[in-house]
Image (tube, rainbow, N blue to C red):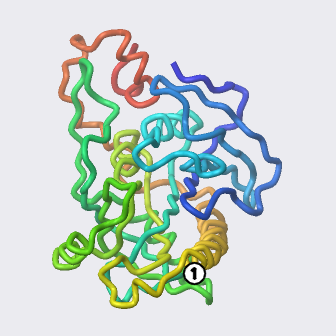
Amino acid sequence: MSGVNPAIEPVRIGVIGGSGLYQMAGLEDVKEIDVTTPFGAPSDKFVVGTLEGTRVAFLARHGRGHRLMPTELPFRANIYALKTLGVERIISASAVGSMQERYAPTDIVIPDQFFDRTRGRTSTFFGDGIVAHITFSHPVCADLGRQIAESGEAVPAVKIHRGGTYLCMEGPAFSTLAESRVYRQWGMDVIGMTNLQEAKLAREAEICYATMALVTDYDCWHPDHDAVTVDMVIEYLNKNADNAQEIIRRTVTNLANQPRTCKCGSALKHAILTRPEAVSTETKQRLSAIIGKYLDA
């Protein structure tokens, strides 16, 4: 079973910060919370505080100090822990490479599609005696994505792009030139290593999910790629982190006390195929935060 102090006030908005976004500015009344899950420990402690009057839980995706590679991330533990905290919406920030000339470094893309190029990563809470098939044709919560985009468009220093496809690659090495050229031919827009698994698990957990893809560089396809230095990428990361925090602050403010009207909150309603009597008590308890409202332990 997950371990959360029942006295902790439920948190409705979660923020997952990627490369360059290791903390959340502006949080007040901050507490660090350890959450245990049936899937092990999350990437780090959750930093829970009040942002513009709304309780928010922040998680450094790679751990403080950037200790975890994309292939090492405890995706299930991260999303399960957010669910147990009461989170209904996840704003994910992630550094990406641009696959198209129109997405320049420091631009922010709010993708509405994902393309999977990972290998063997666990992307589901189900299995081991229970089967579910979620609908995933539209992997991003359109309502949350719109809110983030509108918040970003209100920040003069930021160029926001709505829509597009995030190609999730395995890593940790970046693409070969041949791969990068193929991805461009496929029509991919940005490339990263982390967000697809989060999106799938958030959908299973009935949590709204949207990505802020923070462009730090053109992938190796670009003729000026060799002119990019580590110092330049870090400079772009820092600028993106500042912009991302302002967008998150505005988004949280706009979402305050706004009920969900999307279908994310009922994603499992018709997805579980296993007959209730065939699901073991152990499995029901292990997945209680996910399936509890459909299957009693």
From the viewer's perspective, is residue 203 above or below residue 174?
Answer: above
Q: In the image, residue 111 lies at what x, y percent? A: 37, 70
From the viewer's perspective, is residue 47 above or below residue 232?
Answer: above
Q: Residues within 10 Å of mark 1 (few under 14, many from 20)?
A: some
Nearer-the-camera pick, 176 or 93: 176
From the viewer's perspective, is residue 97 above or below residue 119?
Answer: below
- Left or right: where 5 falls relative to 169: right
Work out whether residue 141 can be spotted.
no
Q: In the image, residue 262 lies at what x, y percent? A: 38, 56
Q: Quadrant of residue 137?
A: bottom left
* Residue identified by numbered label 1: 232
- Element under label 1? helix
Q: Quadrant of residue 196?
A: bottom left
Total numbered badges shown on the rendered structure: 1
Work out whether residue 240 can be spotted.
yes
Q: Furthest-right residue in view?
A: 29
Q: In the image, residue 163 lies at what x, y percent? A: 34, 75
- Say which residue appears at 46% left-offset and 87% top-offset: 227
Q: In the image, residue 125 lies at what x, y percent? A: 34, 32
Give the quarter of the figure containing the C terminus. Answer: top left
- Say which residue appears at 35% left-offset and 16% top-offset: 283
- Say which residue appears at 39% left-offset and 90% top-offset: 224
Q: Furthest-front residue in view?
A: 226
- Left or right: where 69 falls relative to 102: right
- Say which residue appears at 62% left-offset and 89% top-offset: 156
From the viewer's perspective, is residue 145 above or below residue 227?
Answer: above
Nearer-the-camera pick, 41 or 174: 174
Nearer-the-camera pick, 253 or 183: 183
Please state which amino acid type lies under the numbered disc 1.
Answer: Met
- Left or right: where 47 falls relative to 219: right
